[in-house]
Amino acid sequence: MPRPDQTLQGNASATEGAQRRGALIVRASIVGVVGNMLLSAMKAAIGTMTGSIAIVLDAVNNLSDALSSIITIVGTRLSEKEPDRAHPFGHGRIEYLTTIIIAAIVLWAGVTSLSESVSRIIDPSPASYGKTALVIVALGVVAKIALGRYATARGRALGSNSLKASGTDATMDAAISATTLVAAGVNLAFGIAVEAYLGVVISLVIVKAGIDILREALDKILGERMDSDLADRVRKTIEGVEGVRGAYDLTLNDYGPNRQMGSVHIEVDETMTARRIDALTREITTTVYRTCNVVIDAVGIYSTNVDDTSRVSSIRSHVNEIVWKHEHILEVHGFYLDDDARTISLDVVISFDEPHRASAAEAIREEIQAAFPEYVIELTLDTDYSN
């Protein structure tokens, strides 16, 4: 089994990989800081000269984007700290806390902008546009599209939610700036001032972006559904180990990007010795870590009937029929018939679509018990953790 210090930081190569990832995130964030600071200064000057609240709000949004990139840099560096006595699981979740701070900044910018826009609607003031200003705003649109695509691509490649959020935000900003150009065209062509109303739209879009970013970060901290591809890779890796007849109840806890720790139950022959099980579980933890970069810190055991006589097979089939005739059943596993203890054990996975999962499981147990009164039915309700 991996050593405790390997649990989250990994071996030397994994640590070096994490450091490279952090350096690349910082580099991408620096690009965001510089680009957004330049755009913010340019738009603030143009907005002040023209009296356009929409352009000024766009400048404020760019400034908040720059601050978000700075926070991403700080959060990334802090998340790379080694585990310590107070935080034995490492500091990887700081990246998620960083995302929450970014969401708060975005929300603050949106609410402030909304308040200012409403004030301009109540007490309007004229805005003037020049060709130079419009050209610069148009160039800003192109720049934000480039920043957005860059941040999104790097975020996906590095598994950074903060960078992906910045990329989405930048792309959205480009669309907003393009709308500002449309408003300027309306003003020049028809003399209709729509800047304040456009400011309201911009503000609402910013607020929505902040809420979306916040929700994603909270999902990570609360514990969201496992990534199906990763879960499938881990299961197949475990089932590929000789002696394993099935892998079930896989759980993965997220302690930061690329820092997963979990547990699993495996089915083995009932005749397998403790020595063989010990070697088997060590092989599983080592293989999964090397193959999937996931730490399996606990392996539970299901015993499987080796002498699966026609009587045992018949009972197993009857039990499965009883279970599967109920709605929302996803999986049945861990079946074991113990004639000495007079027990039948099994686990059932019931979908979250069933509003009363515990009651449904008890109903199934009682039905099996009625069918086999000579045995004690031990039915465990398992949770649907992944697809």
Image (cartoon, rainbow, N blue to C red):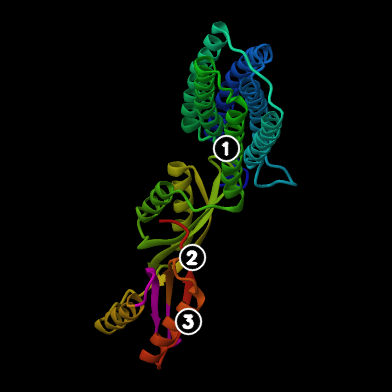
Of badges 1 and 2, nearer the viewer stands 1
Of badges 3 and 1, nearer the viewer stands 1
Camera-side residue of 157 and 305: 157
Is 82 placed above or below 190 here?
Answer: below
Asked if residue 50 shows in the view, the reply is yes
Is 109 placed above or below 127 here?
Answer: below
Q: Which residue does the image show at 43% across and 68% down from the upper left?
A: 349
Q: Which residue does the image show at 32% across and 79% down from the upper left?
A: 316
SS at badge 1:
helix
SS at badge 3:
helix
Is residue 328 shown in magenta?
A: yes
The label shown at residue 362 is 3
Magenta span of residues:
326-345
Q: Which residue does the image show at 71% across and 32% down from the upper left?
A: 119
Q: Position of residue 146 (x, y in %)?
A: 48, 19
Q: Position of residue 54 (x, y in %)?
A: 61, 23
- Mark 3 vs 2, N-terminal side: 3
